[in-house]
Image (cartoon, grey):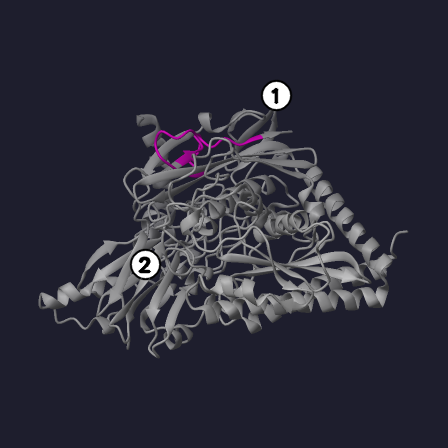
Amino acid sequence: MAVDPITFSIIRHRLYRVVDEAVITLKHVSGSAITNEGHDLMVSLYRADGSLLMGGVGFLHHLTSAAEACKAIIRRFEGRINEGDVFLLNDPYTAALHTSDIYLVAPIHHNGQLVAWSACFVHVYDIGAKNPGGFCPDAEDIYTEGYSSPGVRLVNKGELNQDVLDTLLNMVRSPEMVTLDIRSMIACNNVAHDRMLSLIDKYGYDTVDEACSQLIEQSEQQLRARLRELPDGTWESRQYLEVLDEVYKVNLKMTKSGDELVFDFTGSSPQSKYSVNCTQWASLGGLFAPLFPLICYDITWNEGCISPIKMIAPEGSIVNCTRPAPVSVATVGAIQSVNNAACTTIGKMLQTSEKYAKEATSVWHANHFAIFKFGRSQRGGEAIGIFTETFAGAGGARTYADGVDVGGEIPNPISRMANVETVENTFPIRYLFRRRMTDSGGPGKYRGGTGMEFAVVQHDSPDGGMHYVVSGKGANFPMSEGLAGGYPGAPNSYQWVHNNEAKAEGTNVDVRGTQSIEEMPGEKEDVTWGVFPLMGDDALYVRWNGGGGYGDPLARDPDAVVEDVVGGVVSADAARDVYGVAINQSGNGHDAEGTAAMRSSMRSARLVLEAAE
Amino acid sequence: MSAAFSGSLAIVDTDDGQMIACQSCERPLVATGQPWKPNAAVKELPMHGAGGGAYESADHVVLRQFYCPGCGALLDTETAMSDDPFLNDVINV
C-alpha cells in the first residue's frame, strides 16, 4: 500500500538527514586534512540488496561504486552477515576507485533482518603504496599500490577484529593517523545505523520499506520524464591526459534516445602503463558525478537514477583497465576525465532546452593536482598530506553567468581547501603567496571562474625540508572545456624553482620575500610526475586551471572585462587580444568606440583568415 | 527561430526544412540531423597563449575555433591536436 504523501516526504527528508549527520561524524572524528578540510569523503545509504537508496554529498563518483562494494560483500559473505558487522573493501578491481579510498560498509538489521546498508569512504592518510599518500606515480602495477582487499570483516557483531586492523596498520605509514581514519568511518556507520533504526522505530519497518521503494520508483519516473523533455541526439567530447611524453584520450559519445542515455567511451586510449587508468566501476561513477547534480538536481539520487543510464567502456581501455594495471592516480586521472567529458556532453544537451539551459555549464575545475608532501614535521613526527588547494577548484561558466572564481567542482559539492595557517601549523612549510590566477578562467561571453596560484618553501624543518609526490597531468592540455564558443580554462602548471643553486651562484634575492614566481631568482623546472625535494630555499610553485568559458568572448560586456582587469583576474593584454576591449589610459574604463571598432575588426579578421585558407 | 541548438546556434524553419543556423545572423549551416561543423569556418590557433599568459601549452595542442561564415561569430571551440577529428553534435528534432 502506498505511503501517504506527507509521511513519504518526511521519511525522504529523514533519510537525507541520516546521511548528513553521518558525514558530520566522519569529519569530526577523522584527523586527516584531506577529510576534514578537503572533504574528500562520501556517505550513502543502500537497500538490503546493495542498490543505492540515498546518495549523500562528498565525491559523487563513489555513490555507484559503493553500491557495487555492498553487492560484492553480499556475494562474498552470503549467509554470514551479522548484526553489528562492518566490512572493509578497497580493491579497485572489485568496486573501489583506488586503494587509498577505503570503503567501510555496514549492514543495518532490524529485528534480526538485514534491511539496509550504510557505506562511507575517506582517502586514508596512507595505504602503504610505493609513494606516500596513496597517489603513486612510481607504481608499475596494482601490486605496488599498497594494501588491497576485495572484502574483509573488520568488525564482527560489534567487536573490532583487531588482527584484521593490525594487518592493515602493519602495511601503512603513520598507522596512528590511519587508525583515526578507520575509526571515523566506523563511527560514521554507527551513526547512520542508529538514525536509520530510529526512523524505522518511529514509522515501522513496512512503512519505511515501502517509502524507500516509492522513492526509487519516483526518481526513475522523474528522470525518465526529464529525459523525454529533451531532444534526441548525440553529443561528443574528448579529454586528453598526458603523463610525461605519453598522451591518452578519453573519447565520449553520449546518445539520448527517448528516456534513456547511453555513454559510449569507444575509441578511448588503451590502458596506460601509468597509474592514471580506471576500472569500469570507476568510470560508471565518473559519469554519474556530473549527471546527478546537473540533470537530477531536484531528484533524489538513488537507484532510480541509474536505471535509465547505460555505459559502454571497452575492456582494456584507459576507462576499463584490466588487472594488474595500476590505478592509484585514477581519481584525478581517467575518472576525472570521465567526469569532464560527461559534464561537457550533458551541458551540450541541456543548452538545447529553453527550460533546462540554465542548468548547463562549462566544465569546472577539470584537473586536480594530487601533490602529497611528506617528511618529518617541525615537531619531529611523520607528516603526510595533500595540498588541499586541489579541492578549491574553479567554477565553469553558465549560460547566464560567469563561473565562480575558485568555486569548487561539480563532482564534489562540498569540496574546499584548508587555510594557509592550518597547513603551516601542521607541516614545516611557509606559503609565499596564494591568490587568484590572472587569465586562468576560460574567456567567453561569460568567463570561467579563475583557479589560483601558490608557492611554498620549507620552514623550520628538522631535516632541512620535505619531499612531495606529484601526479600532475594536464600541464599541456587544458581540460576545463568551454561551451558555445567559450574557451577552455588555462592548464595547470607545476614548477620546482631552484633557488638554492641561484643562491650558490651569488644571487642576493631573499626568496622568502618574493611575491611572484617571476621574482624568484632560481631556474624553473617543470615537475609533473614523480617525487621531488623541497629543501633549503627551493620553492614549489603550483597553479591550477580555471573553469571553461561560455559563448564568444567578443560578446562579453566590456564593462565586465574592465572589472576583471581592475580585479586582476584578466590581464590588459587578454582584454585587448581576446575580448577586444579598448581599456582607457586610466585603466578603469574602456573607450566604447574603440572597443566597437576593435571587435568589428576582429570579427572581420576571422572571415578574412578563413577565406585565405 | 524555433529552438536553440546551443548558446550560439539555433534551429530555424526554412523552405528546405529545419536547419541549424547561427544565432547572431541566422545564416543556415546544415539540416538538423547532420553535423554542422564541416560547414563552419574553422581556424586552429596554438593553445599556447590563446587565452592569455596562463595558457602555457605544448606546441602540438591547438584551440580549434568554429566561426559562422556569415558574420564571424564564434560558434564553438575544441581543445585538439591537429589530426583529431571534429567533435560532432547532432540533434534529431
Tag 1: amino acid = Asp
Q: Position of residue A393 (x, y in %)?
A: 46, 58
Taking the magenta stretch, the answer to whether it contains residue B75 is: yes
Above or below residue A302? Residue A406 is below
| Nearest to viewer (mark 1 / mark 2) | 1
The subunit letter for the residue under badge 2 reads A
Residue at numbered disc 2? A584
Query: Quick check: marks 1 and 2 in contact, CB under 8 Å?
Result: no
Q: Nearer the viewer, residue A534 or A523?
A: A534
Instruction: Kindly identify which chain the residue marked by label 1 belongs to.
Output: B
Q: Is A121 positioned to the left or the right of A450 in the image?
A: right
Q: Where the C terminus of chain A falls, by quadrant?
A: top left
Q: Residue at x 28, y 75 (%)?
A: A459
Nearer to me, A149 or B76: A149
The location of residue A595, given as percent across then percent down, is: 37, 49
Label 2: which secondary element: loop
Please say whether residue A179 is visible from this viewpoint.
yes
Type of amino acid at the residue the image marks with label 2: Asn
For disc 1, the marked residue is: B15
Q: Residue furthest front?
A: A163
Look at the image and give the residue range highlighted in magenta: B65-90
Percent x, y of residue A183: 57, 69
